[in-house]
Image (cartoon, rainbow, N blue to C red):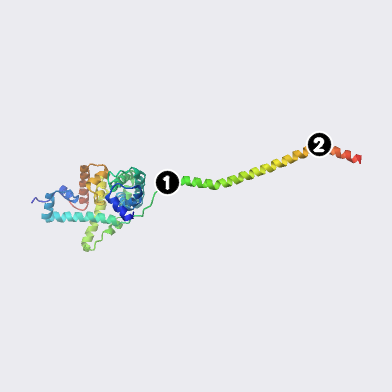
Amino acid sequence: MEPAATASAIMEHPVPETGDFDAVVQLYWPRVFRFAFASLRERSAAEALTQDCFLHAYLAWGRFRGEASIQTWLMRIAVNLVRDASRNRRVQFWKRLQTADAEEIGRGICDGRLSPEQEALLREQVAGIWKATASLPERQKTVFLLRFAQDMTLLEIAGATGLSENAVKVHLYRALRAVRMQMGGSE
Amino acid sequence: MNSHLSSEEMYQWLSGEHGADVEEHFRECPACRTELLQFRSALAGFRTSLENSPVPAVRRKQSSQRLSRWVLASAALSLLVAAPVWWSARQQRAAEQAKADELLLERVQAGLSRSVPASMEPLMQLISREDQ
């Protein structure tokens, strides 16, 4: 099977064949890494976590029954690993804030359609979101990142976090309120 | 039209979980629309900034199963290399032992073939000289 066709089949049909694992890695590696990076704010830690995530997935691949989509299943593994990593690294919180390379991250939002003033405002707002998410409680941050960085639905987030859909909404609204306040808005 | 959307209604809209009444207000209220579009644009910018940040290439971590497979393979290879060396050394030791045994046997044979014991040989030599 061609890689593109395999990727497409995986997207459409949640039950994979064992031989498709390489295609799963290729397809989901960037998504898992980005979630890990946005959560941990450190590239090397995010890369190690991404490797761990796929190692866990590889070892459990034979038991994957396709009850959830592959993305939800992988993100559930990643969420658990991030939670464990955050517990172990809580003492390095301030270090994480410093190592989050906001300038590097902010370079990626240039938009030719915006005026320089609009672009400067957007950069400032995006920097505010990065700053706000760094200090969010763990669950709010996870839910926020899965919704706005991974573009997952509330139902998928519930599947990945083990929370009820209502609990996901509550955490998401609290996170949005904190982010909005950081951006200079009202509650 | 109500005054403005509440915070919760705004969050519902941003999360894509809003009803028709919120959507109607969004269309009709420029202030709420501007605020929501600006917030959505910032959230999209956040996502873009993350998507545009470099992602390291896929690097595989060897599982313990794969690792043990490598350990077994290395052990088998070492055995293949070591076995002929050990066999050769064993053969050499056996050959040396056989040579030593042969020498000992020769000495025993020589001892047995003497007409008098070795300790009596000097005396026998004296006797033979006197006879001459």
Rendering coords of residue A22 (x, y %):
35, 51
Indicate the quadrant where residue A56 lies. top left
Residue tagged 1: B66
Q: Secondary structure at mark 2?
A: helix
Residue that appears at 12% across and 50% down: B20
Q: Is residue A133 left or right of residue A60?
A: left
Residue tagged 2: B119
Indicate the quadrant where residue B31 lies. bottom left
Q: Secondary structure at mark 1?
A: helix
Q: Chain of mark 2?
A: B
Q: Amino acid at mark 2?
A: Ser
Discs 1 and 2 share one subunit: yes
Confirm or deny contact between disc 1 and disc 2 (CB under 8 A): no
Q: Chain of mark 1?
A: B
Mark 1 / mark 2, whichever is N-terminal: 1
Indicate the quadrant where residue B45 lies. bottom left
Q: Is residue B54 above or below residue A90?
A: below
User: Can residue A187 be seen at all in this image of the molecule?
Assistant: no
Q: Amino acid at mark 1?
A: Arg
Q: How many marks?
A: 2
Whole-angstrom CA distance, mark 1 to mark 2, is 74 Å
* Quarter that holds the N terminus of chain A: bottom left
Mark 1 nearby-residue class (10 Å; few <14, some 14–19, many ≥20): few
Query: Is A56 in front, or is A136?
Result: A56
Rendering coords of residue B100 (x, y %):
69, 42
Rendering coords of residue A151 (x, y %):
24, 51
Circle on res. B3 = none
Query: Is B32 in front, or is A92?
Result: B32
Rendering coords of residue B49 (x, y %):
27, 56
Which marked residue is nearer to the observer: mark 1 or mark 2?
1
